[in-house]
Amino acid sequence: MTTHAAMANAIRFLTMDAIEKSKSGHPGMPMGMADVATVLFTRFLKYDAKAPKWADRDRFILSAGHGSMLLYALGYLTGFEDLSDIEQIKNFRQMGYRTAGHPEFGHVAIAETTTGPLGQGIANAVGFALGEKMAAARHGAEIVDHYTYVIAGDGCLMEGISQEAISLAGVWNLSKLIVLWDDNHICIDGDTAISTSDDQLARFQASNWDVCRVDGHDPETIATAIAAAQKSGQPSLIACKTTIGYGAPTKAGSEKTHGAPLGAEEIAGARAKLNWPHAPFEIPADVLSAWRAAGSKGSEARATWEKRFAAYGNKAEFESTNAGILPAVWKQAVSDFKKKVSAEQPKWATRKASQEVLEALTPVIPAMIGGSADLTHSNLTITKATKPVTPRDFSGRYIHYGVREHGMAAIMNGLSLHGGFIPYGGTFLIFANYLWPALRMSAMMDQRVLYVLTHDSIGLGEDGPTHQPIETLSALRATPNVLVFRPADPVETMEAYEAALDNATGPSVFALSRQNLPTLRTTHTDENLTAKGAYVLAEAEGKKRQVTLIATGSEVSLAMEARKLLADKGIAACVVSMPCWELFERQPKEYRSKVLGEGTVRVAVEALGTFGWERWVGENGAVIGMNGFGASAPAEKLYEHFGITAEKVAEAAMVRL
Amino acid sequence: MTTHAAMANAIRFLTMDAIEKSKSGHPGMPMGMADVATVLFTRFLKYDAKAPKWADRDRFILSAGHGSMLLYALGYLTGFEDLSDIEQIKNFRQMGYRTAGHPEFGHVAIAETTTGPLGQGIANAVGFALGEKMAAARHGAEIVDHYTYVIAGDGCLMEGISQEAISLAGVWNLSKLIVLWDDNHICIDGDTAISTSDDQLARFQASNWDVCRVDGHDPETIATAIAAAQKSGQPSLIACKTTIGYGAPTKAGSEKTHGAPLGAEEIAGARAKLNWPHAPFEIPADVLSAWRAAGSKGSEARATWEKRFAAYGNKAEFESTNAGILPAVWKQAVSDFKKKVSAEQPKWATRKASQEVLEALTPVIPAMIGGSADLTHSNLTITKATKPVTPRDFSGRYIHYGVREHGMAAIMNGLSLHGGFIPYGGTFLIFANYLWPALRMSAMMDQRVLYVLTHDSIGLGEDGPTHQPIETLSALRATPNVLVFRPADPVETMEAYEAALDNATGPSVFALSRQNLPTLRTTHTDENLTAKGAYVLAEAEGKKRQVTLIATGSEVSLAMEARKLLADKGIAACVVSMPCWELFERQPKEYRSKVLGEGTVRVAVEALGTFGWERWVGENGAVIGMNGFGASAPAEKLYEHFGITAEKVAEAAMVRL
């Protein structure tokens, strides 16, 4: 019989050899956690390597993403199709192969999420485990009943985001979340004692977790702990005491094994020490076959589930929701809303418009899950259709994340990756800076996560510069694969949501005003003009366009005033509303040229930082916006003080004519 | 005798009345914590309202910055000069007054730091308390011996950054840090139970804190707890059980008091309930005089200290270091280094150049305090002169922050604000996104904090897209008052440090390569060319300049190659090195025009996102850079794959000629 040790050593040597060959990588963690991973993947994890996307599989999250070779070795050994060719392992971290430096969602099926930036994985896992509870509340335990396992390192637990996630897991009592902590007492700079004295077990306990400590190299103890954790009524932390780089003859237990190849001599020593006489990348047939058996063991459970699922009354809805398909009826809601507001022309802040949009959409799109980082009644994110999720009732659709923007975003990523949910979450636009790392992951993983970011400029007034975004929109616009919307009125707000929901392969941001604004789109069009990114809202009148005023959000109405001031002087100005740069960039060149009015004097106005606007106004254009931090005063005073007024816009145009 | 209650009520009514008048603000917290603040400011805090910058004062940090009226009321009542005019209180949150919506460092002396973004204050406080220990280790307890007090709310404790800070305070055993937690069980969305089940006392204890719980409305219990905390050998958390909006007849204890004026009726009710018959903004003479006495009580301690200080041997150095003045000798070190490297022309990565710069500067600038978020040997931030700070020895100059980028940045802010230190801290450039909120505070507070951010592009190679910055530089450049340097070689690296150290009123970022680069500045100049932001590194030869190639950092040498390729085709190209946009923007227009070569074909190259570069290349220029996320492979392959090569740069120029 193939021993546990041989199976664990297979992980260790694939790791050492791949990293040695690529001259790059992190061997310490996979070698240290090989025993734990072997126990998990051979005895507990419910999966079928041949059907990696089975909806009711257990989820495994490698939060310590630098240990990517652990995941790739497991994928190869258990027979995941996209990793079953040893060439993938031999070409670790090379161009054109799936085995990237850190595990990337979409590259290999075994990666449930992209990890590497520490703490993200454990926070995603809280989203996965929450998603499981929520899906189970909707479809029943016959259809949804799976665990979420995490391997996390010291780095993950040091990152602040881990506390936000741990805390929420405790609030929600996510009993099927099991974290295996690689407690090796080593960080990159040396012994963890140089930078932490935390009693992690006590810390997790303080957040309502079940905790225990095991020898991470003793398979039976590990198994006993996982079995107990499965039965626990709380989320579980299992501290696995391990030796980093286990098996390396001279470097084991040292930070030297963390992030660099071990070297030929050390690996030869490990071969001797662990009695592994096989050549690099060679796994003895019995070991490989034992691993492949483990990888297909779950096929039986899957077959049983498939049978149950075939008989499930709500099968079609479960499938389409999981595939991210929206119920057709939602487009009608969009149209109805646009008709209504273009006729009634309310004077709403766009955050209020967003609330009304959500009131219209959440009843017809049940996958939408709301929430806020403790600013519900400022972000206006809750609706009649979205009652709160509580530890006693997961059928709800609204999440009180607390003051945890970063955790919120990472949990939304987890919910989205789990499948079946389109999460949206609110905070102030400025606090995009607290959640930036997780938003970047939404973008990199092509996840349809919606960020409802209100109080989007100095227009928020009295809260002052700490709350007034300046650089925020530029930073978001600079991030690949993010749609950044700054709608001007209720029509554009609905259109922005429509475009965001139509974009199934990336996150969207809505920058929304605190202050009231007029409705500008007073003639209904079924066409989504916001989806073009920018369009002519009001063409120059009387004669050929001389000036093009480009604005977003709350400044579009200001541009309309400026247009009037210019008209009074006999100058023909056009107003372009540009709610989404990224979508505008995708338009044909002729459309863009026409909208931008090449050859005319161009002036952009946006009550945030001016960085990046040269793209649209050119070298001779003007940008009216903020060139420093804001101030604390009523909004109108601030616009006046910082010179963001119709008069200044008109002046900037006139001096350039 | 004026009672404690009357003094506390003075805070409450100034708060209610100011917020009512401005129709904006957060009354709940100041009303709830008025008793605690009164005890602290009348019996414990060592301060002299007439000498708010006294170096050995206790520091008080209002981490729950939305409760700014607490600070302003205290400032007015105790007689801080800049708040002693009641007009400041009457014009809370109005243009032109110091009483901003959130407390701003530099606006009112009583604000030791700017707070509002939650969790920043408590993390700054860890930096202040660390600064105290470090200053005491240098100057002795006769000169430096003060406490750091914090008032924090539930929001501060929910934010992940609090965990990073709490954890480090525990590691360092910062016994003179005392946190008063406003334990009112209310968050904005309602009862804190909806989003937290944390046992905060157990959580802090798990990080080596001393903890206790008191009735936050019972002055004697509060006093006993503070006295005990002062004597504790660990950092202390005092959980103060309070009623939010204490005194409001119908709204007390509810989130309704958190962030909006109470309304005239409710305030009238509070006047009746608390027996406060005085008109708005009127403080009875006995109460004001009791408060002013409290505010001047510390003058005696200060006088005694001044006397000791007058006799202190190291007085001059203490004063100049605290004033942020650098020892004159450092400029010689800069010059020597530049001479040496321009002659020797090493092929160093700029992170290695940074290490050598730090080796040259840290011995001559003792105020420089290094550190890294657990990437010391990747960031290359430690030097011979900077031995680590440990809980047993605070004379060190290097800080192991652990994997806590956000905490690191906020603690650096605290160290800088404390006075006497110029902190620099390292992580990978991509992880600027974890520390962004704190970096923004460095900028807003004009603090000379240095961010050493290595692995600054796809040039880091195999770690892949999770670690490759794309949007990062754009985001940093968009942030006001940050100098962003991306030096090309060892000479520019030293010049960047020189310019950063010369800039005493804001933070600087150094974006540094992982990969080796040639030395390009091979002729020594005493002039700091990097301080001009951009300059002609290699003028076009043979004929009039036709092409201007603009590059930063690792791409400057690539631009030099492209220049050669163009020369081979008979095209006269100039290479402009542009290590710092912000400094270039400050140059006279003629200089800028000359450098940019207006009228020539302009091509920029930078191996990060292209966002914002239109500013320098104009509408007809080209930008060679990244238009999406990176990939995992060796660096050379990535440059090739993404088309960031000398050939592509030359081509882009040629098609535009």
Image (cartoon, coloured by chain):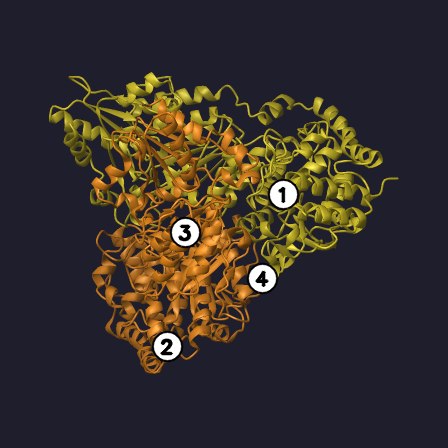
Chain colours: A yellow, B orange
Q: Which residue is mark 2?
A: B314
Asked which secondary structure carries label 2, the reply is loop
Query: Which residue is more in the foreground, A484 or B181?
Result: A484
Q: Chain of mark 4?
A: A
Q: Chain of mark 2?
A: B
Query: Which residue is more in the foreground, B507 or B1?
Result: B507
Q: Which residue is mark 1?
A: A25
Asked which secondary structure carries label 4, the reply is helix
Residue B94 percent coordinates (x, y): 24, 52
Q: Which residue is mark 4?
A: A194
Q: Is residue A321 left or right of residue A330?
A: right
Q: Tell me how far mark 4 sits from mark 3, CA to CA.
A: 40 Å
- As drawn, which residue projects farthest toward the front? B542
- Looking at the rendered structure, the number of numbered marks drawn on it comes to 4
Asked which secondary structure carries label 1, the reply is loop
Residue B135 percent coordinates (x, y): 43, 71
Q: Are marks 1 and 4 on the same chain?
A: yes
Q: Tell me how far mark 2 sits from mark 4, CA to CA.
A: 31 Å
Residue A161 percent coordinates (x, y): 53, 48
Mark 1 burial class by Cα count in 10 Å: few <14, some 14-19, many 20+: many
In terms of sequence position, does the residue under pointer 2 or pointer 3 come before the other? 2
The amino acid marked with disc number 2 is Asn
Name which quarter of the figure residue B55 lies in.
bottom left
Residue A23 percent coordinates (x, y): 63, 41
The amino acid marked with disc number 1 is Gly
Q: Chain of mark 1?
A: A
Query: Which residue is more in the foreground, B145 or A422?
Result: B145
Q: Which residue is mark 3?
A: B343
